[in-house]
Amino acid sequence: MDRIYTYEEVDRYISDIPRFTKKTKVDNTKILLEKLGNPQKKYKSVHIAGTNGKGSVAKMMSLLIEKSGKKTGLFTSPHLIKINERFCINGIDISDERLVELFNRVMEAVEECTIELKEVESSDDGNIWVFQHPAYFEFIFCMAALYFAEEGCDYVVYETGLGGRLDATNVIEPEVSIITSIGFDHMQYLGNTIEEIAGEKAGIIKQGIPVVYNTGDEKADKVIEKKAEQMGSDYFNVPEVWEGISDDLKDSIMSYVNVSVPYQIENVHTAVIAWMVMQGVIDKNGALQDMVSEMSFSGLSSFYWPGRMEYILPNVVIDGAHNEDAIREFIKAIKREQDEKNKTKFSLMFAVSSDKDYESIIRMLCDGLNLEKIYVTEIASDRKTDVADVVELFLKYLPKENQLNVVGNSDLKKSFEMAIGETDEDTLLAIVGSLYMVGEVKALLENKVNENN
């Protein structure tokens, strides 16, 4: 390959991949990884799927493993500001230069596979197909697999991109599989029932590899348990196992964690149980077999996950909630924040992707919160939802006396500046509806800081 790309070109190329290629077979990923020397087999791994909470659990698992003295990679999505955030080792994101180098090498492998593999027999269905350019997530996953191998990681924690069964990350053979809460999201890809969605998530369960799950839904639990039994895998229901741990050990573990939001507490439980299963201190019946040093959990004290109930200014909080389950937890959390900080008024800045059930989300926000003012805007994405459509839905579900307080502006920067400018000391402003918007808002603040320095 003669062409060498710059960081800006790499960023632009990867962002444009969805425009010129569709999702590929998992076989496509396997062939590309084989061309790269199967880097994903050169370290131990942890695999995490779920509707909500999987990013937080991935971060917690990486901290627990790192605290045990292992060099630990972390692959998560989406990124908020820079794509580098997806490739992290012991808390440090990949450099621009290294990212470019990996991109060029994966691109070279893609070109070689395209030339060499005109016809390939699929291991899934036996049909003949042609190797194609990897999809967006597939491409960056291959970059990550190569990066973590070459940097000598002992363990890598992988968060799935979408679903599980057909996800590019599903080529790995982990030490433990983890499935977090399951709810309705991405139904056009994963199914319209909890059972169907759980089935896609359960697709990460491998033969004989233990699975730890905390779905929050009995129907989902049954799907996972049935799949685990079919695969000969031990399975661990987090609430049940956590209940069996002594109160003293629970208190010791939770003393390290500075989280007050209920769903993050559930995520802590999931990560802790998964870590103990991986260490072999919990037997297949969920009973604790060996003494566990409370210091083993001290890595959790470093937990921080941007874009989840995160204060970016004294009266301004951002949260990436973008589906019904996450919005339900957001409403609980924001009410608690409003009470604790004694804020008499509450305003909302909102944008949402078009592939979400955004009418249900808007109805929940209007029913669950006493909204003073609403600033509706758009994300910078092909998946944006038109401001006028969202404003119309807020007007549909708001009480008549509040309908004059809905403001629409497709320019996110102007909408943010207006919201900030009109937020007084008695008002709590929440920015919610999309992780893409969270990233754009954080980038605006970062640019403002850079301009002032």
Image (tube, rainbow, N blue to C red):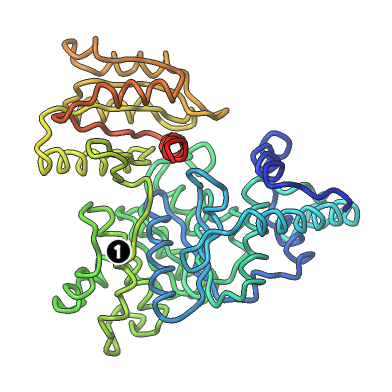
Q: Examine the rendering and report whether any part of residue 268 can be seen.
A: yes
Instruction: Label 1, secondary structure: give it.
Output: helix
Q: Residues within 10 Å of mark 1 (few under 14, many from 20)?
A: many
Tell me what residue is drawn at x 41 percent, y 22 percent.
377
Query: On the rendered image, what quadrant is the C terminus found in?
Result: top left
Of residue 7 and residue 134, the one placed in the foreground of this image is 7
In this picture, residue 368 sits left or right of residue 14: left
Left or right for 261, reference 321: left
Return the residue nearer the eye: 64 or 28.
64
Tell me if residue 204 can be seen: no
> Among all residues in the image, which is located at the extreme front?
453
Residue depicted at 68% across the width and 42% down the height = 8
Residue located at (26% from left, 72% from top)? 241
Residue 298 x, y percent position in the rendering: 30, 74
Q: For the residue marked with disc 1, what is the amino acid?
A: Val
Which residue is at the front of the view, 165 or 354? 354
Image coordinates of residue 87 in percent, x first then y, are 56, 58
Query: Vertical placement of 416 versus 80: above or below?
Result: above
Q: Position of residue 113 (x, y in %)?
A: 84, 56
Whether 44 is drawn above or below 108: the answer is below
Q: How many marks?
A: 1
State which quadrant residue 433 falls in. Answer: top left
Q: Residue at x 43, y 25 (%)?
A: 413
In this rendering, the answer to whether 253 lies above or below 24 is: below
Horizontal side of residue 445 vs 95, given as left or right:
left
Residue ID for mark 1: 268
- Compared across the picture, whether 255 is left or right of 3 comes to left
